[in-house]
Image: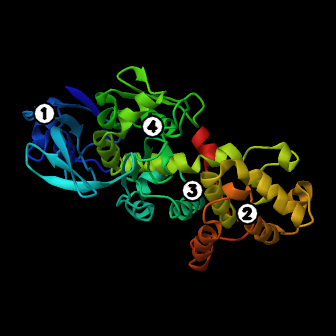
Amino acid sequence: MQEYIVKAGDTLSAIAKRFLGVNGDWREIARINNITNPASLQIGQRLLIPIAASPPITQNPEVAMVRNTLQGVYPPNKIAISFTTVGSDVIAKLLNTGQQESFAKTKDLGLYRLGIFKLRDFIAYGSGLLQQVQMSPSEIKVMLVTSANEGSLDAINTWDSQYLSFGIFQWTLGSAGQQGELPALLNNLKRRYPSEFQYYFGQFGLDVTSLDGITGWMSLNGNRLVNAADKNLMRQPLWALRFAIAGMDALVQSVQVLHGISRLDRFYFTPTQTLQGFTLSQLLSSEFAVALLLDHHVNRPSHVIPCVADAIARSGLTPAQVAQSSIDNEALIIQNYLTLRETFGGTSAMTKSRERAELARQAIATNNLSPQRFSFRSNRQSRFI
């Protein structure tokens, strides 16, 4: 038997299909758990689920868990997978059914997948989950604008020096010898939804360690992935497919959004001497400003605070004057900030700064982002409780 905790929107038939396959009978789950009324499920209720038999595995291929909880494209049990490349297309074939799908394209040392699940769509179908993780409307707006400059929820990249990148902010495994941000994301998933982490990753020997919530290490079958040889294992198409499918799961998607906005805790709400002991949240408080700052931090994290400090100085002000004045100087500071960030850092300046800023301006024009001072509202304190 395995245990499952009922979540919002669950039904016995959906749970049966998820764990027992398309022909799974919800009555068996009801019988095991002494449920007489199938409509009486409660959020948080623990159910015992029988373990479905796995289909026979032939040709000794690698085994992947292939499930898409949003569309039901894949069956819910372990199945054998083979991979082939046709031109630049990487094709996964399900050996028990013969179903095959091009899920990525080859590039350099590995492959990439742009993904099909966009945050703007998740905002609609996953609104309940975002409420469960206590995302504020402002935080959702900011994430929506910022992610438009990044990737899809099921995006994958294994072709560059980071070995494996995943999701809307392309969190990475980290270069050889270095920690990465992807383990911290997965650690968040493991903490909030341990069953999902085990389903997609843990049962295949993958584990994560993140002591600071920002970066961390992955391990595979007990071996920490540190050097290039170890990290190269994550370039395999099998792992790319597993991550892509996990990125299609609504619970994994909700953790991506929450983990993305929690990036603000690292720089927006933290006092710094560069700003005379003030926080960015005390100086720039509109949804527009936060979207610009978060976008900059995803792209060039070390540039954000000194660039804002320069913009305040160029505006003829000090951080203390901005924080303590009743006069709204935000528009002037942002104007100078956007001019500066185009070249701030020289050859390592923010990628496509002007184009990315334009997307935020378009969000203002469509009333999806506010430029008004104090318009940004965060639920971070509620999430810390």
Would you say the residues marked 3 and 2 are in contact, meaning their CB atoms lie under 8 Å apart? no
Q: Residue 343 carries which label?
A: 2
Q: What element carries label 1?
A: loop
- The answer to whether residue 379 is visible is yes
| Badge 3 or badge 2: first in the primary sequence | 3
Q: Where is residue 80 in the image (x, y as percent from the top left)?
A: 15, 38
Q: Where is residue 128 in the image (x, y as percent from the top left)?
A: 42, 55
Q: Is residue 184 above or below residue 294?
A: above
Q: Which mark is residue 52?
A: 1
Q: Is mark 3 on a helix, strand or loop?
A: loop
Q: Is mark 4 on a helix, strand or loop?
A: helix
Q: Which mark is residue 186?
A: 4
Would you say the residues marked 2 and 4 are in contact, meaning their CB atoms lie under 8 Å apart? no
Q: Distance between the residues labelled 3 and 1?
A: 39 Å
Please identify the quadrant where the N terminus is shown. Answer: top left
Q: How far apart are marks 3 and 2 (CA)?
A: 33 Å
Q: Position of residue 67 (x, y in %)?
A: 24, 46
Q: Distance between the residues labelled 1 and 2?
A: 58 Å
Which residue in the protein does label 3 denote?
Answer: 136
Foreground tag (3 vs 2): 2
Q: In this view, does 12 lie above or below 368?
A: above
Image color mode = rainbow
| Residue type, mark 3 in image | Ser
| Residue type, mark 2 in image | Thr
Foreground tag (1 vs 2): 2
Task: Classify residue 163 by image quadrant.
Answer: top left
Q: In this view, does 58 lie above or below 349?
A: above
| Residue type, mark 1 in image | Ala
* 91 displayed left or right of 143: left
